[in-house]
């Protein structure tokens, strides 16, 4: 008999993953070219050349016993120092290798930091719409996820409600910037206001409240938009980063946590996170990939590819009468459905072999997420289906 907690997780298993599997089945029936799967945020751009070059050079010239062996639970010291210095150059920070912990992707990093910080019953606040797995990650350590309702006009955080949600039990706040599923980038003004609220609430309650910035999409920003680096605005900030999107390495599961010296109880947090990395069963981040990302630390994915898709999808849907805001980052479009029940729209879209994700998956019903990390041809070929849907639901361009 499985645990009661796992019964709940199984019953509420990821809608996104289920749709991805459904897409593969449909492709086998109709042919991959006739199924338009916008469900999963799986990068469609090849990793930069430096990744292949680094893997080959490391395999050819490094001692394999060392290359594939254990290291500190926090990761290779030289890799962590390389990442710290890259961040310092980019953002004017003062990190050293002790502030970096290599993780099994951003998801592994979030689990590590929640294991490090949460006692049963501690609250973690996030802003809807949000990546649905946050609920599972917090629940893994018997925390309670408190959700701030969305501002569906701008999708900037609802700061008035946020201030009311903070209690003496609030241990952490998690933000995702650029945001999945909206593509919104939180402005510097928003970040400053959020930080000020946290400072005031820490003082009022006499507690430490950690701000966790989940940043797998940091490098995917468009039109010159700047993504604020949150450690510069609030001392108790921890950053989780992943190379899944920035280097197109989602299956390699490689990322890191940044834990600045300015954190409350920084020495204890850093030490505990390293132990958590081990006792959660990760032990350490993948050895080869640590070495690879160090060599590619300043490389970037092909943002122009995603921008072309963004312009085509946004422009195409707006011309058909769909309502959505233009994403500033990531590779998602969050579209208001022409019917209150977004599942009705998703079912209708499936009849045109179009797979999109219902907004309720992100705690924001009445919308669907469309991932444009697909081929440009997929977007073009899906447009007749989107046009037919617009006609079915009475939209006018």
Image: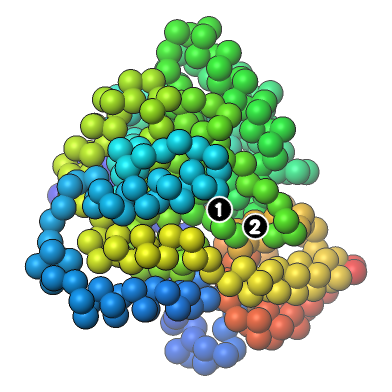
Give the residue drawn at x 40%, y 25%.
Answer: 263
Q: Position of residue 368 (x, y in %)?
A: 64, 59
Q: Nearer the viewer, residue 245 or 351?
A: 245
Q: Residue at x 33, y 20 (%)?
A: 265
Q: Where is residue 20 shown, x and y percent of the image?
A: 46, 71
For label 1, the crowd category at 10 Å Cα-Cα, with few meaning under 14, some 14 to 19 and many 20 or more, is many
Quadrant of the drawing holding the C terminus: bottom right
Determine which quarter of the picture holds residue 244.
bottom left
Left or right of 286: which side holds 88? right
Task: Residue 63: give x, y in percent of width and height.
Answer: 13, 70
Q: Position of residue 243 (x, y in %)?
A: 43, 60
Q: Nearer the viewer, residue 44 or 53?
A: 53
Query: Dot 2, how many residues are within 10 Å of its Cα: few (below 14), some (14-19), or many (20+)?
Result: many
At horizontal 52% and vertical 76% (from top left) the residue drawn is: 45
Q: Quick check: marks 1 and 2 in contact, CB under 8 Å? A: yes
Secondary structure at numbered mark 1: loop
Residue 221, label in figure: 2
Determine the CA span between mark 1 and mark 2.
Answer: 7 Å
Mark 2 element type: loop
Placement of 166 over or under 187, stated as above or below: above
Q: Which residue is mark 1?
A: 218
């Amino acid at each position: 008999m499985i645990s009661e907690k796992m019964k709940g997780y199984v019953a509420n298993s990821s809608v996104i993953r289920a749709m991805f599997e459904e897409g593969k089945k449909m492709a086998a029936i109709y042919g991959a070219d006739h199924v338009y799967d916008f469900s999963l945020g799986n990068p469609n751009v090849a990793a930069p050349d430096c990744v292949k070059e680094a893997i080959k050079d490391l395999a050819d010239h490094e001692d394999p016993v060392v290359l594939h062996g254990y290291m500190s639970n926090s990761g290779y010291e030289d890799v962590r120092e390389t990442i710290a210095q890259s961040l310092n150059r980019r953002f004017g920070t003062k990190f050293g290798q002790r502030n970096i912990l290599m993780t099994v992707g951003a998801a592994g990093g979030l689990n590590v930091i929640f294991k490090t910080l949460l006692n049963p019953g501690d609250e973690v606040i996030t802003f809807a719409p949000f990546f649905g797995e946050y609920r599972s990650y917090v629940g893994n350590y018997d925390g309670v996820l408190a959700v701030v309702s969305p501002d569906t006009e701008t999708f900037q955080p609802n700061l008035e409600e946020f201030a009311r949600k903070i209690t003496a039990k609030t241990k952490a706040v998690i933000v995702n910037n650029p945001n999945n599923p909206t593509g919104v980038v939180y402005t510097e003004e928003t970040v400053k206001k959020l930080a000020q609220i946290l400072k005031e609430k820490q003082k009022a309650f006499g507690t430490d409240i950690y701000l966790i910035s989940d940043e797998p999409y940091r490098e995917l920003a468009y039109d010159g938009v700047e993504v604020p680096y949150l450690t510069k605005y609030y001392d108790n900030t921890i950053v989780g980063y992943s190379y899944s999107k920035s280097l197109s390495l989602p299956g390699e599961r490689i990322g890191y946590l940044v834990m600045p010296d300015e954190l409350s109880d920084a020495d204890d947090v850093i030490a505990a996170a390293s132990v958590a990395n081990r006792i959660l069963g990760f032990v350490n981040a993948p050895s080869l990939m640590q070495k690879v990302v160090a060599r590619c630390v300043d490389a970037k994915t092909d943002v122009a590819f995603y921008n072309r898709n963004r312009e085509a999808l946004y422009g195409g849907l707006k011309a058909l009468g769909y309502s959505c805001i233009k994403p500033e980052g990531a590779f998602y479009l969050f579209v208001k459905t022409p019917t209150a029940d977004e599942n009705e729209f998703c079912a209708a879209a499936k009849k045109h072999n179009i797979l999109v994700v219902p907004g309720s998956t992100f705690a924001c019903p009445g919308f669907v997420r469309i991932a444009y990390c697909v081929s440009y041809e997929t977007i073009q070929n899906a447009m007749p289906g989107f046009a037919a849907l617009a006609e079915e639901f009475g939209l006018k361009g």
